[in-house]
Amino acid sequence: MDFRTLSASQDALASQTADALVVVMAGDTLPAGLDKTVAGLVKDAIKLGDFELKAGQVVTLTRPAGVKAARLVLAASGSSLKAGRAAVAAALGQVKGRGVSHAAIALVGFEASLTESLVEQTVLAAHEAVYVYRATKPSAPAASKLEKITLLVGKDDAKAVKAGLTRGQAVANGIALARECANLPPNVATPTYLGEQAKALGRSHGLKVEVMDQKAIEKLGMGSFLSVAKGSAEAPRFIVARYEGAAKTQAPVVLVGKGITFDSGGISIKPGAGMDEMKFDMGGAASVLGTLRAVAELKPKINLVVIVAACENMPSGNAVKPGDVVTSMSGQTIEILNTDAEGRLILCDALTYAERFKPAVVVDVATLTGACVIALGGVRSGMYASDDELAASLSAAGEAALDPCWRLPLDDDYAEGLKSNFADVANVAGREGGSITAAKFLQRFASKYRWGHLDIAGTAWKGGAAKGGTGRPVGLLTHFVLSQVR
């Protein structure tokens, strides 16, 4: 999509040329200085009962008198960033599929401090509005005609608008990559495919990328990771990609993604209903690759390493069994009590591998537990952190990106259930606090650096009629990485 900015006074909106003029207004009164023609049309719509200056209200006027654009879309908004994003999305929903190829958008009545973030969210809302999955669906609706958006901005806002536009485009591209990878069927988005996507990113963005095959993984001693891959005919892949934007002496941020491209549950097989959605179990891998793309486009002065452990979890005569004991890369032995708790088994070896980079911080991202879905639903991702400062940074990044998370505890008492009579640790505890005990398992392998964990089981995809990947938490992760620039 082509995004542009045009310097335009708030009192000269009616003269703007576009297929649709979208005016998003914050507050419950007409913004001061609003174009007289537009203000008059707003008043008329209110008198007719077609519109209210109340958050959530939206109306489209066709060929409005005195306005050059063929359509005028009026959207009322609250004053917050979240409300602004919702209003823009609602307004764009009015023009989607209606032959509009060029929309001009004016954001009026918002605090100047919100401009940069609001522009970023406008870009993201526009990309969301036109997204249609079609990779394996020839019958999908034709691509949206909405191809160009002009942001009408004041001269004083030019710098903030440019920054928001740049970041918004990068995050949108990252979300698009993550979303498309997640939506592809598991016979297409295999571990090999994820490796190919990483290599393609390396070629297009000048990144260092290494994709290791099974022999290389075996040499590393990743017995826990490989135990999960044993039951599948698909070969595992261990992906390491590096963006180097700072001096080599600067410790990198490391993001680790869970890449289970299909999760049957293994021998502890899942119920059949909804199992097709287990193609989304590589949402963590998709999101860190998407974040890598966003960061590479923004080019911040930071070093970033992205690690993906990718395989399938399938039942077969070769598959790992409940009661098996495996040896992780760290040397710790693990009793596998449930083969459907496989994400932590691949992540623990990836976390040990991350030690070699002497990282400033490591954050792993995984569709890890159904327990997190029960706790937080699909609104916030579960977040764990080894220290308060890191937790605050992750939380702030989520709020800034409108991709929120919520911190959950890491009390040592929660690890009691992971004790085993036959290994150093069991891979599951009881049902209670399942997301927390999973995090406590991972924490054992992340003791040598600052560590955070995002459980995105509730936020990486949606079910039902809206079934599909969300691209979360690319926004959160991108803002977090940018916040670490020193």
Image: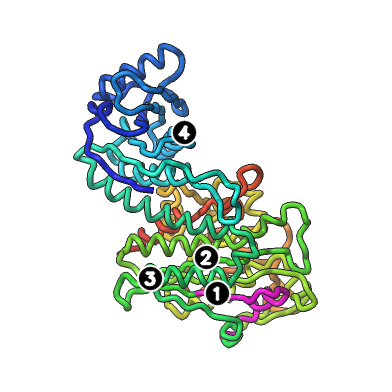
> According to the image, label 2 marks what residue?
364
For label 1, the residue is 350
Q: Residue at x 58, y 82 (%)?
A: 217
- Kind of residue at badge 1: Ala
Q: CA distance from mark 3 to mark 2?
A: 17 Å
Q: Nearer the viewer, residue 211 or 420?
A: 211
The residue lying at 48 percent from left, 70 percent from top is 198
**CA neighbours of label 2 inside 10 A, class few (<14), some (14 to 19), many (20+):** many
Q: Nearer the viewer, mark 4 or mark 1?
A: 4
Q: Tell whether position 460 is magenta.
A: no
Q: Nearer the viewer, mark 4 or mark 3?
A: 4
- Spatial separation of the CA atoms under disc 4 and disc 2: 42 Å
CA distance separating discs 4 and 3: 41 Å
For disc 3, the marked residue is 243
- The residue tagged 4 is 98
Specify which label sits upstream in the sequence, 3 or 1. Answer: 3
Comparing labels 3 and 1, the label whose residue is closer to the camera: 3
Asked whether disc 4 touches disc 3, contact meaning CB atoms under 8 Å apart, the reply is: no
Q: Above or below — where is 340 with respect to 398?
A: below
Badge 3 element: strand
